[in-house]
Amino acid sequence: MSSNPRPQFKSHALKRITPDTRFYVDYSWWDESNLDLKTYLFTRLDIGEDVELDTSVEEVDLVDANTGEVRRVDGFQYMIQSYFNQLPDDFMARASLVDAAFCVLLANGNQPMTGRELAKRLQRPIDVVIRTLGGPRIYQGIRPVPDDD
């Protein structure tokens, strides 16, 4: 009997990534890393220099435009979503693919988006988006949705 155990793979690591694979920001990745999401957003993406965010707001009532449903969301997440929805048109072209994808997902309220949708919003080739975000390395918590078939 071997003393080396068999490697364990997470289901998303074995999944075939296609243009229709949906991606999202996995906040548990941030929790498990030695990085702090709020600090990253304030420093790396230069939020705060040209925009003042009220970080004391704990929750915000958000109305779903399609269903009329009111739900409570994290105040910081709502402010970040609003900020990213107001980025200049040339931001996606100037930012790295990973930063741009991260911003697009947060602007979308972290609702999963397909590789195809991301490529269109990022104005980047679909194969580059899929190889980067669907590869073995996780960038900024961006992962394929685990139960997506």
Image: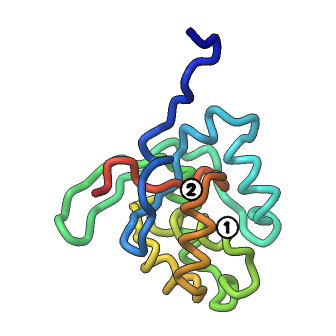
On the image, numbered disc 2 is attached to which residue? 142
Q: Amino acid at mark 1?
A: Val
What SS does tag 1 mark? Answer: helix
Please tell me how crowded label 2 is: few (under 14), some (14-19), or many (20+) other residues with Cα within 10 Å: many
Residue 147 vs residue 82: left or right?
A: left
User: Does label 2 or label 1 sit earlier along the sequence?
Assistant: 1
Relative vertical location of residue 30 with respect to residue 88 in this rendering, above or below: above
Tell me the residue at 74%/40% (across/down).
35
Residue 32 vs residue 8: left or right?
A: right
Residue found at the very far front of the displayed protein = 1
Relative vertical location of residue 43 with respect to residue 26 in this rendering, above or below: below
Residue 36 vs residue 78: left or right?
A: right
**Which sits in the foreground, 91 or 34?**
34
Q: Amino acid at mark 2?
A: Ile
- Location of the N terminus by quadrant is top right
On the image, numbered disc 1 is attached to which residue? 98
Find out whether the residues at labels 2 and 1 contact each other: C-beta distance under 8 Å. yes
Using the numbered discs, state the Cα–Cα distance from disc 2 to disc 1 in whole angstroms: 8 Å
Q: Position of residue 6 (x, y in %)?
A: 54, 24
Tell me the residue at 67%/46% (across/down).
37
Question: How many numbered tags mark residues here?
Answer: 2
Q: Position of residue 76 (x, y in %)?
A: 57, 51
